[in-house]
Amino acid sequence: MSTPFLWGVASAAFQVEGALAEDGRAPSVWDVFSARPGAVRDGHSPAVACDHYHRWEEDVELLERLGVNAYRFSIAWPRVVPTGDGAVNPAGLDFYDRLVDALLAREITPLPTLFHWDLPQALEEGGGWSERATAHAFASYAAKAADRLGDRVGRWITLNEPLVHATYGHALGVHAPGRTLEVPGVLEVAHHLLLAHGLAAAELRSRGLEAVLTNNYSPVEPAGGSGAGGGPDEEAARAYDTLHNRLFTDPVLTGAYPDVSALGADAVPGVRAGDLDLIAGSADGIGVNYYNPTRVTATEPGAGLPFGFGEIPGVPVTGFGWPVVPEGLERMILLLGERYGSALPPLYVTENGCSYPDAVSSDGRVRDRDRIAYLEGHVSAVEAARRRGADVRGYFVWTLTDNFEWAEGYHQRFGLVHVDHATQARTPKDSFAWYRDLVAARR
Ligand code: FCB
């Protein structure tokens, strides 16, 4: 019997849990960064978020009503190993243990992510992802989580979007830990993240478990078009594609880093003998987080970055201003197949969704028609890619409940369920009913 296609929703610990100082959890880089004046829009605090740590049973009931057969959530490293490395905090694991049991009791497959950006602050103070030791600490935390939950959880996501963590967090400084390293330093962080994935994957596999690596993917188009006349925009697009789509995938699927010279470095620093052997072939699945394609323009020489960004004309945008291009997801999935051929493991669309300024009407409904249109288009794109032979095994909407959207605080509402952040009242939106019906029809 083949495993059924996974229809799910996705979330992340720091965005929903709150309870930042409970049951032995220690601060993460996001606790510290979000307290910096100006770091989060309007100074929104993650202290409560969706209060999921206390309301998880209500949220599991919502999942049951939604009828999904999978739930992607993340485990907070600073709950499980508060100092990052060393002693495990059993109370931290207890929370996920209860959650996993509650999901399984409803025939919902748990798909945990081990790292969704909440590095224990203690590790950051020792150098964070600039240090190789952080990769080893991650693997030992992964082993501890797997020892506790591996009897019930067969498939694990190691890292969420290392690209975004490396660039937003370590180059642009707009996400935690808020560092602004030069290109070689960022590439070193990237390598340590991939090493962490490789080491953790080995721990998972040695226990008979699967390791999935989730990246953010975006098909890149040169503003000036491709082919004759594409010129400098095409070169810029290639550089951006290397950074966005290849840097964290080529080593895993081909055993080598792409040429990073266009990014302004001779090579990726910090790579030691044996690292790439460990990283190569270390994914039993690739998680595709897709939101939109990227249009790239050339920049003037000496402009710092070798690419600029342009608007995609003629398409609607979400509340975040992100262009809505569902075919981009089909294109991206097919491109991964063309690029990596038989080296490409099964794909899971581990995030896809959109934010809009949703409000509850006086009749209690949230009429989020734009979200339904967005999701409808993207589900169709996944199905089109599957018809063309792509091995996609799951689709996860980002996200269940409106939550703490990183530097945007509570401004971007991505949920199928509206959350009143003052009262924590949860109101399923029209898209919730739409997705419920879709999942019921497809299952
Ligand atoms: C992704 C993140 C996720 C969420 C969505 C909107 O990049 O993985 O946590 O913030 O964007």
Image (tube, rainbow, N blue to C red):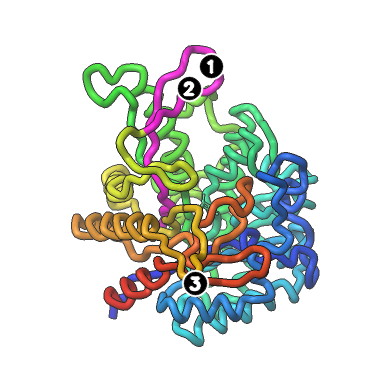
In the depicted view, which residue is nearer to us: 234 or 47? 47
The answer to whether mark 2 and mark 3 are in CB contact below 8 A is no
The verdict on residue 61 being magenta is no
Rendered location of residue 252, percent (x, y): 45, 48
Range drawn in magenta? 285-311
Tell us which disc is closer to us: 2 or 3. 3
Quadrant the C terminus occupies: bottom left
- The image's mark for residue 303 is 1
Q: Which amino acid type is marked by label 2?
A: Pro
The answer to whether mark 1 and mark 2 are in CB contact below 8 A is yes
The residue that mark 2 highlights is 306
In the depicted view, which residue is nearer to us: 248 or 400? 400
Q: Is mark 1 within 8 Å of ligand 1?
A: no
Residue lying furthest top: 301
Is any part of residue 274 visible from this angle?
Answer: no
Query: Residue at image x 47%, y 35%?
Result: 243
Query: Residue at image x 61%, y 36%?
Result: 188
Residue lying furthest front: 362
Q: Which amino acid type is marked by label 1?
A: Ala
